Image: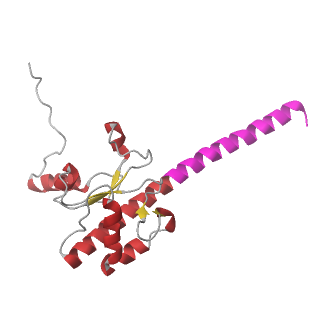
Amino acid sequence: MTLIEMTITVFMISLILFLLTGWMTLTRQASRESMAVRELSDLDNALARYKRATGSYPSATGANAAILACQDLLEHPRSRDILGAFPKVLWQGLEADRVLLDPWGTPLRYLPFETSSAIVIANNGRPIFLSAGPDQDFGDENVAAIGDNLRSDDPGPDGFRLQEAIREALDASEPGATTQPTSRPAQP
């Protein structure tokens, strides 16, 4: 092999490894997001089962609200099987104080029905589990970090069910109406 052939071979191998590394990173990120959506959807299902069986949602407030809510869900037979099916990698700690993590390793938050959170109020008082998302920031200090947070009431990346329900209701009530905002005249 000449020096030029060897350089081209090394360059091609380097390029293939670079592309493969990028592809693996994207695949890993998509897998984590899919796992988070599934986890939050299962938590929403567990909350619904718990409510149907007991007549109320788990009441847990304070810094350990997510731990207490998960304990309540684990203690009830109707919701225990859902939480018991989560992979062990999503749990941290001992049995009594187990913390449920999202796929990025951040502990989930629980907003109970008693809270005055705008998210819970907009969800008709239904409690919500929150994931901080890939940036592992709930947006407490930097509001811009809220954009990638995932919620148990609507964990999917395709939009909020409430917005879709409003669009469908508008379409059904006004044939031919559009859901796009109309432009307003400029205010002086």
Chain part drawn in magenta = 1-29
Could you tell me which quadrant the C terminus lies in? top left
Relative depth, front residue between 12 and 63: 63
Tell me the residue at 33%/43% (across/down): 146
Q: Is residue 127 visible?
A: yes
161 relative position to 1: left or right: left
139 relative position to 19: left or right: left
Q: Is residue 155 visible?
A: no
Q: Position of residue 57 (x, y in %)?
A: 22, 68
Residue sticking out furthest to the top: 188
Relative depth, front residue between 43 and 140: 140
Compared with 8, 79 (above or below) is below
Main SS, magenta residues: helix
Q: Position of residue 86 (x, y in %)?
A: 44, 69
Compared with 45, 122 (above or below) is above
Relative depth, front residue between 37 and 126: 126
146 relative position to 170: left or right: right
Tell me the residue at 36%/76% (across/down): 80
Magenta segment: does it hold 2? yes
Magenta segment: does it hold 112? no
Q: Position of residue 79 (x, y in %)?
A: 33, 75
Q: How many marks?
A: 0
Relative depth, front residue between 6 and 101: 101
121 relative position to 134: left or right: left
